Image (tube, rainbow, N blue to C red):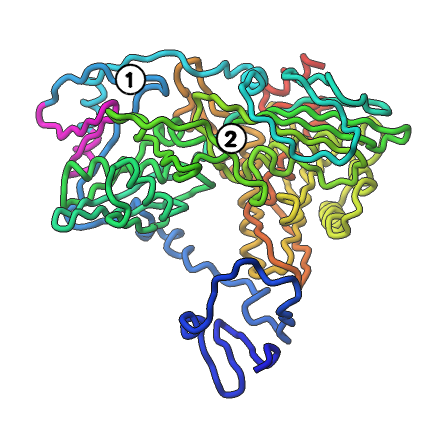
Amino acid sequence: MPPDAVTVRRGVFGCGGLTATYGDLAEAVPLDREEPPPPGAFPHPPPPEPVVVGVSVPRLDLPDKVVGRPRFVHDLCLPGRLYGRVLRPPSPGARLVRLRPLEGVRVVRDGSFLGVLGETEPEADRALARLRKAAEWEERDTLPDERDLHAYLRTGPHETIAVLTTTDNPPAEPDTGGSPTTGEPPAGTVHTATYSRPFIAHASIAPSCAVARWNERDGTLEVWSHTQGVHPLRTALAQVLGHPADRIEVRHVEGAGCYGHNGADDVALDAALLARAAPGRPVQVRWSRQDELTWAPFGSAMSADVTAAVDATGMVCSWAYDVWSQGHVSRPGHRGFPGLLAGAHLEQPLTYPAAGEPSPASGGGMARNAVPIYDFPHLRITGHRLLETPIRTSALRSLGAFMNVFAIESFMDELALAADLDPLAYRLAHLSDERGREVLRRAADAAGWRGPGQGLGFARYKGNGAYCAAVAEVEAEHHVRVRHLTIAVDVGQVVNPDGVRNQIEGGATQAASWTLKERVRFDRRRITSGDWASYPILRFSEAPEVSVELVEHPGTPSVGAGEAAQGPVAAAIANAVAYALGVRVRDLPLTREAVLAAIERD
């Protein structure tokens, strides 16, 4: 029968009087394809009226979360449950040298991995306190100078990645300090600036948690985890434990907050190691707040140099961008390594390389959104990944896009100011993408754009995802406070309008927190930001009002909304602060100290 005679509604195929579900057809229809069909091969005209697509659907999970019903892995209660706690080394370079005997405490030790078991949580917590006093560690300084992340990231060794060059005579390459040394000097008036962001923690409200049980009767291991990848975690556990992967089952249970690769996988190995010492009984391991803020993978610190040559009217005629960063992925299984924290602390420790990079096809990591959306005639974009590092980094929401959009969009405002042009008009003058232009205009109209005084940020996530423009209104007296964010977003075909707004509002709020407050602190030996006082996040009372405009394009492919707002919001806030204070802060977060440092610099 011809394809246009078949309808699909609410997951049911229909043709004449015949119906079938996807499940009915699964065994009869081959689903594997070597490559996707060409665009337009299977046209799907929109239904005469919305059925599911385009209709806001209430979330099924919210009622439980609002009233506090058990829902998360932390709430999982299996018969015979034991509670486990793990004593982490006091610093990344520490090694356990002595453990005094402890009577009445069920201690699990494997090299520098230490844990305890208890019948109740208070018992496990008391045992952990005693274990901490009984352990002696040898420590050494391994961490860089937190006060000079630019130098740390640029010292090397590096993998240099040529992201994009669009001319036979590209702008000059930098040396390790960022100054041009080779290539053709740019024609026109040259502007340059350097931007940075610090290491950032996931800082989920609930720390990571997992449950594991070794079954004596059949030698299987069961794990309940809020991991983002049950199959890679199973493989990683098999590698570390030396246990067949087909004898391990990982079940996903929701966790309370996750923005990429946090401690969910690590705590699963902790639970498995402790459960191996208590066969037949499920063991729940919950990290402490300090564990979460000091041992989960961070989002990498980044440093970027931007150089642009402009003509007599202030229009960009060449653009060079160099970004230095650690890698942005060390998830379990990446490049064949298990990547689980406790694996490096065992008697036979595993060694892991520095974090790597996602493929360009998936958006890249440090170079995500490093290529500007604007129509610049000559471009050179280069990434420099640090190959040796004592600080563990991996995927954090939007990866490098947060920093890259902050830098690019801050520099666009600086160029507009130098040319005495309106920031919105300056962007539109460099942008031919009609959907992008529409998003910029919609955000400006919704915010009542007044030009300098408000801050603007714009990008298309990954270069092929959602368009997002943000306008920020701030006040800056003793501290910077974001009063209002107006955001326009184009995600193509909108499936669930309320869901898109939720994602944009949440991303914008988190981006505001990163931009204003968040920074991992450390000395030369230890991560020191282990609580909410030393690693502050945006409080409810500080959260800005967020207004979201959906720029809809029915019939176009739907793209994700979850990470589109991070970079534009950071840039919009930074640009608004620059207008409010008359000083440009190029190093995140935009704290009182950063503002004073920028004033001294200028």
**Residue 232 makes an appearance in the image:** yes
In the rendered structure, which segment of residues is drawn in magenta? 103-125
Percent of width and height locating residue 295? 38, 28
Q: Closer to the N terminus: mark 1 or mark 2?
A: 1
Q: Nearer the viewer, residue 26 or 45?
A: 26
Residue at 61% across, 30% down: 161
Q: What's the residue type where badge 2 is placed?
A: Gly
Q: CA distance from mark 1 to mark 2?
A: 26 Å
Residue hosting label 1: 95
Residue hosting label 2: 327
Asked if the magenta segment contains residue 405, the reply would be no
Q: Could you tell me which secondary element the residue under label 2 belongs to? A: loop
Q: Is residue 218 above or below residue 577?
A: below
Percent of width and height locating residue 37? 60, 63
Percent of width and height locating residue 447? 72, 45
Left or right, residue 130 beside residue 324: left
Q: Could you tell me which secondary element the residue under label 1 belongs to? A: strand
Asked if the magenta segment contains residue 107, the reply would be yes
Estimate how packed mark 2 is, as few (under 14), some (14 to 19) or many (20 or more) residues with alpha carbons within 10 Å: many
Residue at 30% across, 44% down: 74
